[in-house]
Image (tube, rainbow, N blue to C red):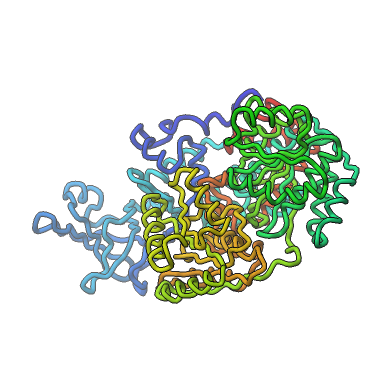
Amino acid sequence: MSGRPEQLFPLFAELETLQGVGPKTAEHFAQLRVSAPRDLLYTLPYSVVDRRRRDSIRGLELPTTATVEVTVGRHRPARNKGGAYRIDVTDQDTEFQLVFFHGRSRYLTAQLPEGSRRVVSGKLELFDGMAQMVHPDHMLPVEEAGEIPDFEPVYPLTHGITQKTMFKAVQSAMSRMPELPEWMDGGYKAKQGWEDWHVAVAAAHTPGGAEDLEPVAPARARLAYDELFAHQLTLAIARSVEREQPGRSSVPTGKLQSKVLSALPYRPTGAQGRAIEEITADMASARRMNRLLQGDVGAGKTLVAFMALLVAVEAGGQGVMMAPTEILARQHLEGLQPLANAAGVVLEILTGRDKGKDRRAKVEALQRGDIQILVGTHAVFQQDVGFADLRLVVVDEQHRFGVRQRMELAEKGKRADVLVMTATPIPRSLALTQYGDMEVSILDEKPPGRKPIKTAILSTERMSEVVDHLRRAIAEGRQCYWVCPLVEESEVMDLTAADERFKHLRAVLGEDVVGLVHGQMPPAEKDAAMAAFQEGRTRVLVATTVIEVGVNVPNASIMVIERAEIFGLAQLHQLRGRVGRGTAESTCLLMYQPPLTEGGRKRLEVLRESEDGFVIAETDLQMRGAGDVIGTAQSGLPRFRIADLERQADLMAVAQSDARALMTSDPDLTSDRGRAARTLLWLLRQDEAIRLISVG
């Protein structure tokens, strides 16, 4: 896998080698993420102009685009500077005018001599009862008119790039397309009725009508599948490289687990039982576990994770649970402590706060194996922290771990198993995209005893009623979160929004009743504000979205979310899950600023009607699109040029099983199909995967 295959060289040459592309144009192309001829092949038209020839413009509904053969009549040069230069023309049945602003007589008489026959194509409009074509897109002698396609592709443009430049450059790039060996499974390709790669690219750029622009059009579907397949192949390679590193078999005795189960006030749900079985089987095998535990708010992930940690301890080793922040690490500690007590295992915490003698004592205890389960933040990664026998790393997926970070993490544990937990229900198609290298366990049942949360939708005009409601709740000893929106990503503005709400509520409810926490605070202040709320010293916590992550305050039973219409559904669902953790009836008030759009109202109603995170996530995906659901910037979601994640989710699932099957039958990609697949990885710039294969 030394380097890019030679047949791809022409597609990765300089842009300036293409027709009509100079250094300046090449710079403009960069705005469209186009830096090589290959990128032009993957920049597909988004609409078409119907330029089919007609005999006459008579009977057309104007304005419209028309292509017609005409006889050129009188030229009428502009009478004053800046006026219009007009040329009368007649087709078979009727006459109209061609209009040019700043038209130069010499040029126009040469192009359109009186009495000549020409094919003109452009936008026809009615002006003072006369049909006019202003600046035709095409004016050609009849014998050259074959150059005008029946359906002209319309490309995305950017400053400095015209349709003409784009069309020419694409044509030029297509003339260099090699016939590549087929990387697709032959049976599947035949069943779908798809063409070879170079045929599909050419077809995608020469649509025969609007239907050819749809994601389901055969040429586009084939190219989309290639993208999804290359992405899944990259994940499958990462997965097999990860699996080739030998794991450790951790076989549980069941002793500690049964102690915990008998101490629980309820029985685990069926989903929890299944997840525990899947994880236990993974840990007992000699392969390294790399599993995602996906569960909705309150589905009981903590118990499942703790059972997995006990497998490591029963097998004579240690486990660590990583949290993104100090607050969350402490919270995990609180959640796990009663379980650890029941099992009789030693549980400790290690964060950046541990200093000096204390820290040294903990590090030594870890190295001796006296601490069996450790909860920690990134501090666990420091050089001097070593384990006697680390067998399981549990990562709380609040800090968007990518494939690369998961690999680094596992190295620390010298072949330790890895379990990643996420509280964000992700629709299956997106889970495949983001976590395609992992096995997935899903918790889709709620443990008994979680009370439903009442959700209401109110206009901001009813602010005073909401504040009265709070006043009564506080008098009854309850607590409340008040979430202010992140305004346009500008943190300064968020601050003022949160600050003003904080001052207003303090004025109405009392100085010491209301706390504030936002992203700009120093960590120590943030911790202090959170602690005051957790301990019940403050009753209302005004916050920007920093609280959606994991905070547990059982006494908080009201959640107010301002400007709920600008939040994502999944995010609103996460926020709502912060209440309803105690014994009190809980409510969530979604406040919107009128007028509410149709889409906005529909989204908020989904929340009112459902508490199932997976249902909500699927709806969110349909309504907003993939990038928004996970937040493209930090999601690590690949940016596909052609594949449409919302509308081609089914192809993603096929691509995943296909990629995994290929890696199983041909792990080094040396068969004919395997070598073709390597070419695809180069073609689609999957450099990460290529590096892994050459290393692996």
Q: In the rendered image, is residue 392 in sight?
A: no
Residue at x-position 49% and y-position 74%: 469
Query: Along the line of sight, which residue is nearer the eye, 25 or 78?
Result: 25
User: Does residue 114 appear to the left or right of 421 in the view shown?
Assistant: left
Q: Position of residue 322 (x, y in %)?
A: 66, 41
Q: In the rendered image, is residue 547 in sight?
A: yes
User: Does residue 550 appear to the left or right of 660 in the view shown?
Assistant: left
Query: Along the line of sight, which residue is nearer the eye, 579 or 192?
Result: 579
Residue at x-position 38% and y-position 58%: 497
Query: Along the line of sight, which residue is nearer the eye, 162 or 226?
Result: 226
Q: Position of residue 396 (x, y in %)?
A: 65, 46
Residue most toward the top? 2
Q: Position of residue 501 (x, y in %)?
A: 40, 62
When asked about the image quadrant of residue 691, the answer is top right
User: Does residue 374 appear to the left or right of 585 in the view shown?
Assistant: right
Q: Give the number of callouts.
A: 0
Q: Position of residue 3 (x, y in %)?
A: 61, 25
Q: Is residue 276 above or below residue 70?
A: above
User: Which part of the image, by quadrant, shows the C terminus?
Assistant: top right
User: Which part of the image, by quadrant, shows the N terminus?
Assistant: top right
Q: Is residue 192 above or below residue 319?
A: below
